[in-house]
Image: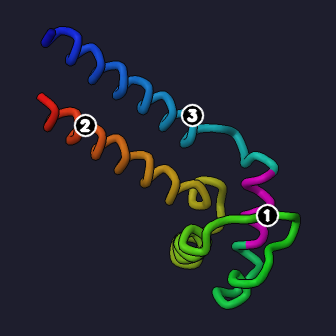
């Protein structure tokens, strides 16, 4: 029984690690990420509350978070993905805690 739990934990961490590596190291943004990035870079905070260009839709909290990262860090591909990467890391940590509590 303990071996099964350890195997599940290891599988979740390996899966999360590969998703994280795929998120961090791709060559460029996907089309929808690029279109959203254009909206974030070109618009002010107030303009993000208006309908976005290029048929893009995103939660306002996400838009404001990415806009803050872009404003204070840079407007490159990695920075536009950084809030999502940080959220993925937090999810992995929370999942590890949840699995640990079930033991």
Which circle marks residue 56 in the picture? 1
The residue that mark 2 highlights is 96
Q: Residues within 10 Å of mark 1 (few under 14, many from 20)?
A: few
Q: Quadrant of the N terminus?
A: top left
Give the structural element (helix, strand or loop) at label 1. loop
57 to 91, vertically: above or below: below
Give the structural element (helix, strand or loop) at label 3. helix
Where residue 58 appears, x then y in whole percent? 67, 65
Which circle marks residue 22 in the picture? 3
Left or right placement of residue 79 versus residue 100 in this view: right
Q: Give the number of the mark in front: 2 or 3.
A: 2
Which residue appears at 42% of the width and 32% of the height?
Answer: 16
55 to 102, vertically: above or below: below
Q: Quadrant of residue 37?
A: bottom right
Which residue appears at 74% of the width and 63% of the height?
Answer: 36
- Magenta stretch bounds: 32-39
Disc with the residue nearer the chain's start (2 vs 1): 1
């Amino acid at each position: 029984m303990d071996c099964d739990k350890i195997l599940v934990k290891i599988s979740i961490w390996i899966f999360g690690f590969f998703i994280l590596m795929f998120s961090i190291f791709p060559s460029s943004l996907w089309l929808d990420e690029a279109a959203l990035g254009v909206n974030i870079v070109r618009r002010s905070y107030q303009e993000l509350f208006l309908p976005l260009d290029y048929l893009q839709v995103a939660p306002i909290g996400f838009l404001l978070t990415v806009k803050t990262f872009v404003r204070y860090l840079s407007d490159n591909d990695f920075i536009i993905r950084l809030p999502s990467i940080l959220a993925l890391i937090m999810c992995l940590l929370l999942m590890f805690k949840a699995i640990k509590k079930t033991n």
